[in-house]
Image (spheres, rainbow, N blue to C red):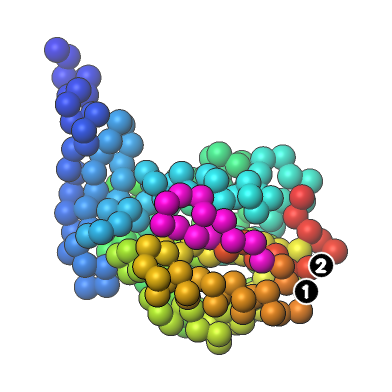
Amino acid sequence: MSNLLPDPISYFLGKHVATYQSAVSGKLEVWAYRGKKILYSENATQSFDTLHKLFQKVFPEAGIKKKMAHPPKRILLMGLGGGSVISIIREELKIDAPIDAVELDPVIIDIAKEHFNIGRFSDLTIINDDAYNFVQMAKTQYDLIAVDIFADDKVPVKFFEEGFNLALLKLLNPGGKLVFNIMVESKAYQKKAQDLSTLYAEQPGVTVKVISPILYNNVLIVERAGTNNLS
């Protein structure tokens, strides 16, 4: 068999590529499966695989699609991972708006560069910061905000706080869309997701839709009213 061909067993079952130990995220592993790399933490997918499928379903539900009459002019991504969400926006939806990606873990940023070729995307600014702090200080307005912040398989509790979410909402332009991914496999997190949905729905000029694109995940789709609706 030619050395240029992949080993069929590892191609279909997956092959371990690298392991990292992070002070922020704990154990991280990169695996190759069917010619594509996937980033895992101890108990969850951090990039591609199921996460990729999730956002492939979420963006159309939020009205973010190819050939939009008024595509987003600036995008904020909270949680970089290996760049799965960015690849959907750039390569699948063909949206070339500048993206600011906020990622707390420098090890994940290094993994995204080394294993997922994140450098291929133009107009991408990677910000090594805590998303909680970033939102409090940011002044830039965005047309699309995607929140995918996980410590392993949990959204840290502080990101459910009213102060964080109201500050986040202020960064959303009129007509803009916010999508917030939450794991809801426990009753405690189901309650947090419900409370967060209620918080957004109580704000003037804001509408909220909750979808379950894959098992154990709820995604809030928040839209801020205005004359520049994305369509």
Residue at the farthest front position = 187
Q: Secondary structure at mark 2?
A: loop
Look at mark 2 in the image and give the residue it sits on: 226
Q: Earlier in the sequence, mark 2 or mark 1?
A: 1
On screen, residue 172 above or below 109: below
* Residue nearer the viewer, 72 or 45: 45
Look at mark 1 in the image and give the residue it sits on: 205
Q: Is residue 88 left or right of residue 115?
A: right
Residue ID at (78%, 59%): 229
Q: Does the magenta segment cover residue 215?
A: yes
* Percent position of residue 102, x then y: 46, 68
Magenta span of residues: 208-219
* Percent position of residue 2, x then y: 17, 14
Question: Residue 104 lies in what quarter of the image?
Answer: bottom left
Task: Indicate the quadrant containing the N terminus: top left, top right, bottom left or bottom right.
Answer: top left
Q: Does the magenta segment cover residue 154?
A: no
